[in-house]
């Protein structure tokens, strides 16, 4: 089996030719991200708000997983999760994380580095209230990242919470809410022919302005 995989990989020499970046990026990376996101949306990029975040664990290993960007604020990228999960424990250890968007259909990736903090409770409440009831109950039922005896245990917990909140709105559990990633560094990457890709970086300076520069592919 592995031989077949390696044959496929060996013969895969696709080139990138979707687009190029002119030297005209503005001076605000959030604005540029906004434009890129809209472009991704117009080009029917699947899961365009899926962002891979990497956190640092106390054991010195990084770990990555996909979360959904649910809001883009002037100050950064908001995602929602369980505040007792593995990623939340990592964030308590180190609030410095990275995020990655990969949009295959338009041959672009955006890499972000920044610092995360919890969003105000009201924002988490607002988002939680907007979720389908089934997802709200799911948040109560799942001790995210903790060991689970079997699937049945989880489904039983869901039923219990369904009963507990029968006929009532499901409140947001205190252990569930949002984080905002406040970026200090961006790289906007556009695939180009012959592996001579465009890479445009924004680095936040002490006076909060952004230094903009290209780097080699
Ligand atoms: C497309 C996709 C979207 C996801 N969105 C979220 C999300 O918004 N929040 C979340 O907590 N987990 C989300 N997950 C699940 C996470 O990838 C991960 O399994 C979970 O958060 C537990 O991670 P942890 O154990 O490292 O904390 C998503 C997974 C996929 C594949």
Image: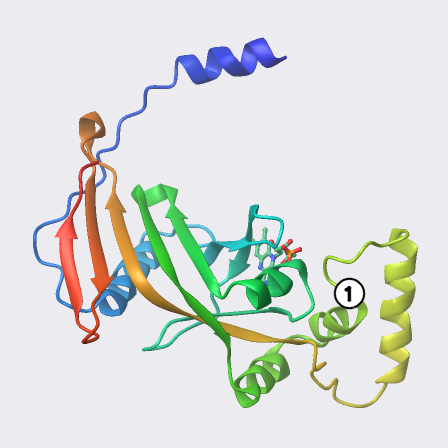
Say if disc 1 is inside 8 Å of ligand 1: no
Task: State the image coordinates of residue 13 (x, y, percent, origin top left).
Answer: 32, 19
Quarter of the image where one finds residue 193: top left
Q: Residue at x 43, y 56 (%)?
A: 98
Residue 126 vertical placement versus 39 (above, below): below
Looking at the image, residue 147 sits to the left or right of residue 131; the answer is right
Task: State the image coordinates of residue 27 (x, y, percent, origin top left).
Answer: 14, 67
Secondary structure category for the residue under label 1 = loop
Q: Residue at x 17, y 72 (%)?
A: 209
Residue 37 vertical placement versus 196 (above, below): below
Quadrant that contains the C terminus? top left
Q: Nearer the viewer, residue 93 or 68?
A: 93
Looking at the image, residue 166 sits to the left or right of residue 114; the answer is right
Quadrant that contains the N terminus? top right
Looking at the image, residue 62 sits to the left or right of residue 83; the answer is left
Q: Residue at x 87, y 61 (%)?
A: 155
The residue indicated by pointer 1 is 143
Looking at the image, residue 76 sits to the left or right of residue 167; the answer is left
């Amino acid at each position: 089996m592995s031989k077949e995989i390696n044959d496929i990989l060996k013969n895969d020499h696709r080139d990138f030719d979707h687009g190029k970046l002119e030297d005209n990026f503005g001076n605000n990376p959030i604005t540029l991200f906004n434009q890129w996101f809209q472009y991704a949306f117009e080009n029917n990029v699947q899961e365009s708000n899926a962002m891979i975040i990497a956190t640092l664990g106390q054991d010195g290993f990084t770990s990555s997983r996909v979360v959904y960007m649910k809001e883009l604020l002037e100050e950064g990228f908001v995602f929602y999760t369980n505040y007792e999960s593995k990623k939340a424990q990592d964030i308590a250890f180190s609030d410095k994380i990275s995020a990655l968007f990969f949009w295959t259909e338009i041959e672009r990736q955006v890499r972000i580095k920044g610092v995360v903090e919890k969003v105000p409770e009201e924002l988490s409440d607002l988002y939680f209230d907007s979720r389908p009831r089934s997802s709200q109950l799911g948040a109560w039922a799942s001790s995210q990242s903790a060991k689970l005896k079997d699937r049945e245990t989880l489904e039983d917990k869901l039923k219990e919470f369904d009963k507990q909140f029968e006929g009532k709105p499901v409140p947001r559990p205190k252990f569930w809410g949002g984080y905002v990633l406040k970026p200090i560094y961006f790289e906007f990457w556009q695939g180009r022919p012959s592996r001579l890709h465009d890479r445009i970086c924004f680095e936040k300076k002490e006076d909060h302005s952004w230094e903009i520069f290209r780097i080699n592919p």
